[in-house]
Image (tube, grey):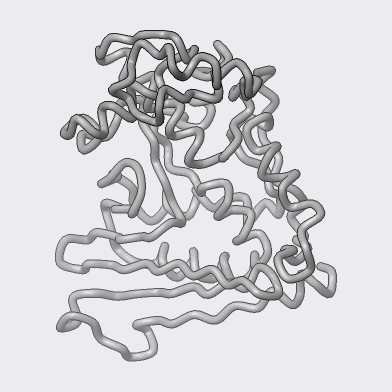
Amino acid sequence: ASASASAASSTAASSAAGSALFGGEFEFEVLTAKASRESVYQEAAFLHKPSRTLLLCDAVISTSAEPPPILLSEPEYRRALLYHARDDPLEKVEESPAVLRKGWERIALFANFFMPGSLVTLETGAWLSAAPRTPMPELGWGGVLPFSWKASTSKAFDAFSAGGRPAVAPIIQIILSRAPEQASAWVQRVASWDFVSVVPAHFDAPLAVGPKEFASTFDFLAKGTNEVRFCDEDVLFLREALEGLPPNLALFDTPLGSLRGQRCDL
C-alpha cells in the first residue's frame, strides 16, 4: 500500500468493550474509516439478540424488481415512479405494475450510480421546448424531463439487482477500499454474531441473510480487488468523478485498485 493508503486509519467502538445497550439486548460494532484527508465514514451494526436480527446503516443493500410497498402506498410516491418511467418528455404513461417497475428500476440506478450508463441526457433546447407541452403536468417539475433512457436499462438493473442478492453499495465500496484491513476486521466481528435476518436502512428489508452470506458480500476485501457485479458503464461516472478532486476532497490511494464492473454493452 502507498503512504496515502497507509494513512487511512480507522477506529471501532464495540459492545465487546463492555458497553451495554438497552438492557443488554444489543451487541454493536461501529466502524470509523478515514477515506480522505477531511472525510470520515462510519457504519454501525447492531445485533438484536432476542430476535437474532442484524441492523445496518449503509453497508449492505438488496434491491428486487418490485418497488417497495411504501412507494406504492402514497400517490406522491407513485407519481415519482411514473415520472421516471417515461422515455420522452412528451410521452404519456398509464399506471400499471409494469410501468411502476420501470420507474423503480431507473430510480434505483439513479440512487446508486448518480449518472448510470444507460441514462441519456437530452439537449437543453429539446427538453425546454417540450416542458410546456407535457401531457402529464400532474407529475410536476413544470413538465421538465431533461433525460431519457436506453432500451438496455433493464439489463443494467438486472446486473445491479441480481435477483435481490445482497451487495455493497458502490460508493460505500469505494470508501471501504481505502481502509481494507479495518473494514475486514469489522466484517469478521459482525459475522461472528448469531443472526438469521438483516435489516438495512435502505432498499429491501428484512433480508433472510445469516453470517456467512453477510461476510461473502464483502468478498472484494479478501480478494484484494475493487471488482463489482454491476455494469462497468454504470460505475464509470463514480470512477471518473474521483479523478481531479481538490486535495481536501481527494481520496487516499487504495491497494484494491479502481472500481470496475462487468462490461454490459449498454
From the viewer's perspective, is residue 9 above or below residue 177?
below
- In front of the other: 258 or 17: 258
Percent position (x, y) of residue 121? 62, 24
Q: Which residue is drawn at 61% across and 60% down?
A: 175
Q: Which of 109 and 262 is in front in this view?
A: 109
Residue 42 at x, y percent in the picture? 49, 70
Report the quarter where the C terminus lies: top right
Q: In which quarter of the image is residue 68?
A: top left
- Residue located at (66% from left, 44% from top): 238
Q: Is residue 158 visible?
A: no
Residue 34 visible in rendering? yes
The relative height of residue 112 versus residue 34 in the rendered view (above or below) is above
Q: Pick the quarter of the image with the N terminus.
A: bottom right
Q: How many numbered circles does the render carry?
A: 0
Question: Could you say where residue 216 lies in the image, as x and y percent from the top left?
Answer: 50, 49
Question: Would residue 217 appear left or right of 54 to someone viewing this image?
Answer: right
What x and y, as percent, mark residue 177? 66, 59
Side (left or right) of 54 relative to 49: right
Residue ID at (74%, 55%): 256
- In the displayed orientation, state which residue is furthest to the right: 2
Residue at image position (44%, 34%) is: 108
Q: 226 or 88, which is in the foreground? A: 88
In this picture, residue 17 sits left or right of residue 231: left
